[in-house]
Image (cartoon, grey):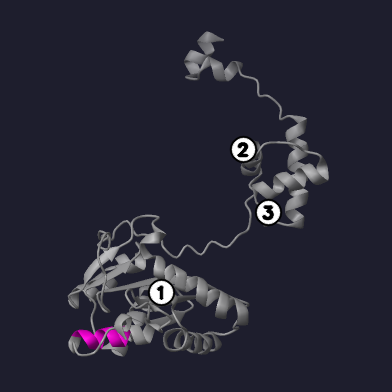
Amino acid sequence: MRKQCELLGVARSSVDYKAVAESEEDIRIKRHLDETFMIDPCLGSRRLLTVLERDHDVKINRKRLQRIRREIGHEAIWCKPRTSIPDDGHRRYPYLLRKLSIDRPNHVWCTDITYVPMPGGHAYLCAVMDWYSRKVLGWAVSNTMETGLCLEALENALSSTGCVPEIFNTDQGCQFTSAEWTGRLLDLGIKISMDGRGRWMDNVFIERLWRSVKYEEIYLFEHTTLTALRAGLTKWFTRYNDWRPHETFDNLTPTVVYQTTFESRKNPSILPPEAA
């Protein structure tokens, strides 16, 4: 046997090894997992532990369950929009807002993309916000998540304000690290700031905006077309900017905070919102 293995160039351990048959318990668990997957393919490992114990009297730990699911190729069906995928070939910029005192409009703008579920598919929403006043300066909607969506929102913000910020903060998604986006900002003389990896808190104000717009407009009305979605968002952003009081600014609206503070810096005789 030793000589034969040497001539064939194989290890003796592989020749002597006898495969161990799969346990009857694992086979039984896999059969129950198949049945459960046909009933509800959206269950994760935590809920599956409860279902297996309740319906089939199977008690196993989560780590073993995950291993068995990998062996049979099961994965829960869940929404994975992944709107912040970096591109390895693009340059990242440092985060410039840490310990920075932001005390005026147009000092810092920020932007982000969010996933919009729709009955017949999905869309993507990009918005540009003034960090100081929380005012939404421009936004755009598209059924694709390309850099053009972000540039459209940026141009809308530039045209509506006629101003250019000193710093523009984004995440590290491939749209915001692309040459088209960064080149446009650099041409305008804007400093580029980017969140740290996995640091959603670095852009927390626009993340909070997404929660509001989704629960107060998108989930509530379930627009079926992009035209209807744009019309609904137009009404919601107008109400958010011009009508809805903001507790942070003594119940003033973002538009009042933005315009009053901006005008008071150009004309000191105009009082800021805090002194009005």
Q: Mark 1 vs mark 3: which is more N-terminal?
A: 3
Q: Nearer the viewer, residue 51 or 259?
A: 259
Looking at the rendered image, the disc whose residue lies closer to the viewer, 1 or 3, is 1
Q: Nearer the viewer, mark 2 or mark 1?
A: 1
Which residue is most to the front? 275
Q: Is residue 208 magenta?
A: no
Residue 248: numbered disc:
1
* Span shown in magenta: 258-265
**Of the numbered discs in the image, which one, if any, rests on residue 256?**
none
Cα separation, mark 2 vs mark 1, equals 45 Å
Disc 3, SS? loop
Asked whether the residues under the numbered discs 1 and 3 touch, taking CB atoms below 8 Å apart as contact, a structural biologist would say: no
Q: Secondary structure at mark 1?
A: helix
72 vs 93, nearest the viewer: 93
The residue that mark 3 highlights is 43
Residue receiving disc 2:
63
The numbered mark, 2 or 3, whose residue comes first in the sequence reads 3
Mark 2: which secondary structure? helix
Looking at this view, is 227 or 252 the one in front? 252
Q: Quadrant of residue 216?
A: bottom right
Q: Position of residue 136 (x, y in %)?
A: 39, 81
Majority secondary structure in the magenta region: helix
